[in-house]
């Protein structure tokens, strides 16, 4: 994340020349997504889905999507492309916070590796039988 933010200027200059120099601040803002998307995806797919929290996943997804659109309508006219980048980052961080909140509310511990592996083996077996 910090590498992307620190070297955004040289990266854009080497890859796209100076014609896209205006993309540097946007790339710096979006560099936050590297960590937040990794954490959110891990919580969504590695924890919530395997703990049968499908409704909570849907709620978090819809709420963060609505937040993204609302922020885009406000921030983009104010700050242009940087405002849109900020709205995406804020919505992604809200999704991460929503995941953590839903897991805490459900008091769902991490899924057991054995149960996840067992379901995978059963699914593979059933797929081969049909």
Image (cartoon, rainbow, N blue to C red):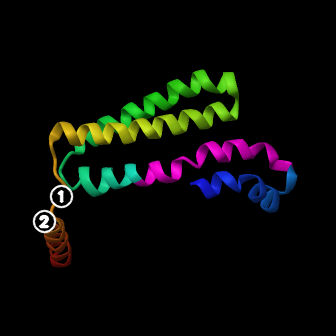
Q: Main secondary structure of the magenta part?
A: helix
The magenta segment is 19-38
Pair 1/2: label in front:
1
- Residue denoted by label 1: 111
Query: x and y percent of residue 60 in the render?
Result: 33, 37
Horizontal and vertical percent position of residue 62: 37, 34
Mark 1: which secondary structure? loop
Q: Viewer-proximal residue, 114 or 55? A: 114
Image location of residue 79, percent across then percent down: 69, 27
Q: Nearer the viewer, residue 59 or 125?
A: 59
Q: Quadrant of the C terminus?
A: bottom left
Q: What element carries label 2?
A: helix
Quadrant of the image for the N terminus? Answer: bottom right
Q: Can residue 55 be seen in this view?
A: no
Instruction: Provide the residue designation for mark 2.
Output: 115
Identified at 16% across, 47% down, the residue is 108
Residue at 43% x, 55% y: name it. Answer: 38
């Amino acid at each position: 994340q910090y590498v992307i933010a620190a070297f955004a200027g040289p990266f854009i200059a080497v890859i796209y020349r100076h014609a896209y120099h205006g993309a540097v601040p946007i790339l710096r803002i979006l560099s936050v997504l590297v960590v937040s998307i990794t954490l959110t995806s891990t919580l969504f797919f590695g924890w919530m889905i395997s703990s049968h929290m499908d409704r909570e996943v849907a709620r978090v997804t819809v709420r963060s999507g609505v937040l993204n659109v609302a922020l885009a309508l406000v921030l983009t006219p104010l700050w242009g492309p940087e405002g849109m980048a900020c709205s995406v980052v804020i919505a992604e961080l809200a999704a991460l916070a929503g995941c953590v909140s839903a897991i805490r509310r459900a008091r769902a511990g991490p899924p057991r590796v054995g149960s996840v592996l067992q379901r995978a083996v059963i699914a593979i077996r059933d797929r081969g039988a049909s």
